[in-house]
Image (cartoon, rainbow, N blue to C red):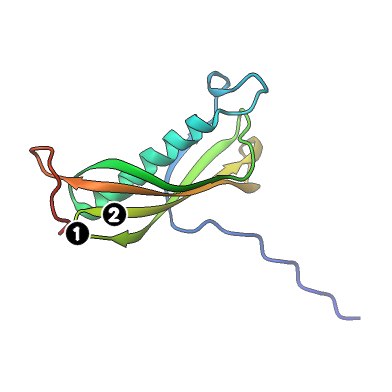
Amino acid sequence: MIEAEPAALPEPSGALTIRTLAMPADTNPSGDIFGGWVMSQMDIAGAIAAVERVRGRVATVAVEAMSFIAPVKVGDILCVYTSVERVGTTSITIAIEAWARRERIADRVKVTQGRFVYVSLGEDGRKRPIP
């Protein structure tokens, strides 16, 4: 009898950009972490990736897509991964995945994914071309 190889576990796409601990103050009445808190962590990570690519200031201009896949629980470590999806003249689109490490161990589950768009800004606060 030939044994099948175990299925490969899904892996995050992109570079690990931030990790943070989900705390009780960030919960809704059901005890899950607020989706808005997760979204803000994704926006922070996306901005970090965008700033690194455009080598300057950016502002969030759109969330093109966002899917909540699984809840984040108190005590989870939220790991946010980013990758540059598109670079335009003045805007940049960042693909973002959020994964939770349950009970602070290696077991990971994808909880959210999305695409955030940032615009490159000059020192005067106006759009500037991306180098």
Residue 108, percent across and down? Answer: 62, 48
Quadrant where the image shows the N terminus: bottom right
Q: Position of residue 55 (x, y in %)?
A: 18, 51
* Circle 1: residue type: Thr
Tell how many labels. 2
**Is residue 118 shown left or right of residue 39?**
left
Question: In this rendering, is residue 35 above or below 6?
Answer: above
Q: Secondary structure at mark 2?
A: strand
**Left or right: 59 as drawn, with respect to 26:** left
Camera-nearest residue between 36 and 111: 36
* Residue extending farthest bottom: 1
**Residue 92, image quadrant:** bottom left
Tell me if residue 62 can be seen.
Answer: yes
| Label annotation for residue 36 | none
Q: Amino acid at mark 2?
A: Ile
What residue lies at 37% left-to-right and 53% top-to-bottom? 94
Q: x, y percentage for residue 34?
A: 55, 28
Say if 110 sits above or below 29 in the image. below
**Disc 2 marks which residue?**
92
Q: Image point 17% across, 56% down: which residue?
A: 130
Q: Residue placed at 38% from the left, 43% from the top?
A: 45
- Residue 98 in view here: no
Q: Which residue carries the number 1 mark? A: 89
Q: Residues within 10 Å of mark 2 (few under 14, many from 20)?
A: many
Image point (57%, 59%), residue name: 11
> Is 10 rendered above or below residue 22?
below
Q: SS for tag 1?
A: loop
Residue 22 percent across, percent down from the top left: 54, 29
| Marks 2,1: beta carbons within 8 A | no
